[in-house]
Image (cartoon, grey):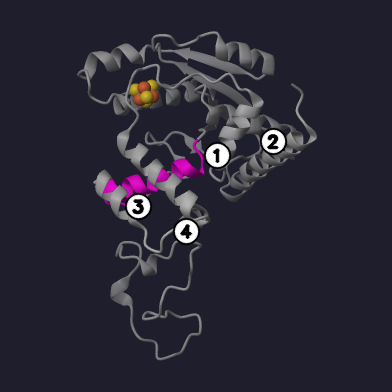
């Protein structure tokens, strides 16, 4: 059935928003420079398809030249549909490479049945992708993580790692050799899901390895989704907060020299109002209190 005018309008708006937000992140964090060769990691999930699609568009309209090469790692999970990505990428006319490495057998061999396999699997995958980037002469590695992945990671680190730390939009790889970028850093997962659906990307399911989804991440996702429904604007505010950090108002002495704090004797109208109520209000739907906070956090702990 052909799309209605209303559906086309909604799709164009969505596409424009994803492209605009990706462009903004690229610009704001200095992700792409003229002459870059960007290795786009393509897993076959909605996020990486959206990433490649959007980067291809930006490559066409950007005032600078950069190259893109899509890379998929075939980890030899049983049932992996090997033909899907090569067919899609050939049709798209983009340079690509499928790297075949049986990390599935290594992981199954090393991790006892019933234990989570993701950390070893990701470590192996990371090593292979770095090696591939080096071989291809890629100057940047692009990953499809989005805004909601970054917020979830922030909470995971706070709840389970005792750290105020998320997933950066741009970083140097742990082996020091590569710059990793996350151009979808400003995009909402909801938008990406709708876009992937409308574009009918040939999604490859991510549960082929049979591993359980990380339960802690799942709980945090539920908590955030619930907040999003009941307190419109809270997630947006959280993400804005991640870009608006005041080390002098946290408690990390390595980021701010608290020992050097002294009274200046000079009034400052932008100075601290240590005893005032916080200057924000939140839109609330439902009851005044927020029992979900307590319930979810207790369940997760
Ligand atoms: S879900 Fe499976 S493929 Fe993905 S990281 Fe975990 S073990 Fe690896």
On-image quarter of the N terminus: top right
Q: Does the residue labelled 4 lie within 8 Å of ligand 1?
A: no
Task: State whether the magenta stretch is mostly helix, strand or loop.
Answer: helix
Which mark's residue is nearer the viewer, 4 or 3?
Answer: 3
Contact flag, marks 4 and 1 (Cβ < 8 Å): no
Q: How crowded is mark 2: few (under 14 residues within 10 Å), some or many (20 or more)?
A: some
* Sequence-earlier tag: 4 or 3: 4
* Location of mark 4 (residue): 241
Separation (CA) of disc 2 from disc 3: 41 Å
* Residue 292: mark in rendering: 3
* Location of mark 2 (residue): 58
Q: Residues within 10 Å of mark 3 (few under 14, many from 20)?
A: few
**What secondary structure is marked by label 3?**
helix
Which residue is pictured at 29% across the width and 24% down the height? 117
Separation (CA) of disc 1 from disc 3: 21 Å
Q: Give the range drawn in magenta.
A: 145-163
Separation (CA) of disc 1 from disc 2: 21 Å
* Location of mark 1 (residue): 190
**What secondary structure is marked by label 2?**
helix
Q: How crowded is mark 4: few (under 14 residues within 10 Å), some or many (20 or more)?
A: few
């Amino acid at each position: 059935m052909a799309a209605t005018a209303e559906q086309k309008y909604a799709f164009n708006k969505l596409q424009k928003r994803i492209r605009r937000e990706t462009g903004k992140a690229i610009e704001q964090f200095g992700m792409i420079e003229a002459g870059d060769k960007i290795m786009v990691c393509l897993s076959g999930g909605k996020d990486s398809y959206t990433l490649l699609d959007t980067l291809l568009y930006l490559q066409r309209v950007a005032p600078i030249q950069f190259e893109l090469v899509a890379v998929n790692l075939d980890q030899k999970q049983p049932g992996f549909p090997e033909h899907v990505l090569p067919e899609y990428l050939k049709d798209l006319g983009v340079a690509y490479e499928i790297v075949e490495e049986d990390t599935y057998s290594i992981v199954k061999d090393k991790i006892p049945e019933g234990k989570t396999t993701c950390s070893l699997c990701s470590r192996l995958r990371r090593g292979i992708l770095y090696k591939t980037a080096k071989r291809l002469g890629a100057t940047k590695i692009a990953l499809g993580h989005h805004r909601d992945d970054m917020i979830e990671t922030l909470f995971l680190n706070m709840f389970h790692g005792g750290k105020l730390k998320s997933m950066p939009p741009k970083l140097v790889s742990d082996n020091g050799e590569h710059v990793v970028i996350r151009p979808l850093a400003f995009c909402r997962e909801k938008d990406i899901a709708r876009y992937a659906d409308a574009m009918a990307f040939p999604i490859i399911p991510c549960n082929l390895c049979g591993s359980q989804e990380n339960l802690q991440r799942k709980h945090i996702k539920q908590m955030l989704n619930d907040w999003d429904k009941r307190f419109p604007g809270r997630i947006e505010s959280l993400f804005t907060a991640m870009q608006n950090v005041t080390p002098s108002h946290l408690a990390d002495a390595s980021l701010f020299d608290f020992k050097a704090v002294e009274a200046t004797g000079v009034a400052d109208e932008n100075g601290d109002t240590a005893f005032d109520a916080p200057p924000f209000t939140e839109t609330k739907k439902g009851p005044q209190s927020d029992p979900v906070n307590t319930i979810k956090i207790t369940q997760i702990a």
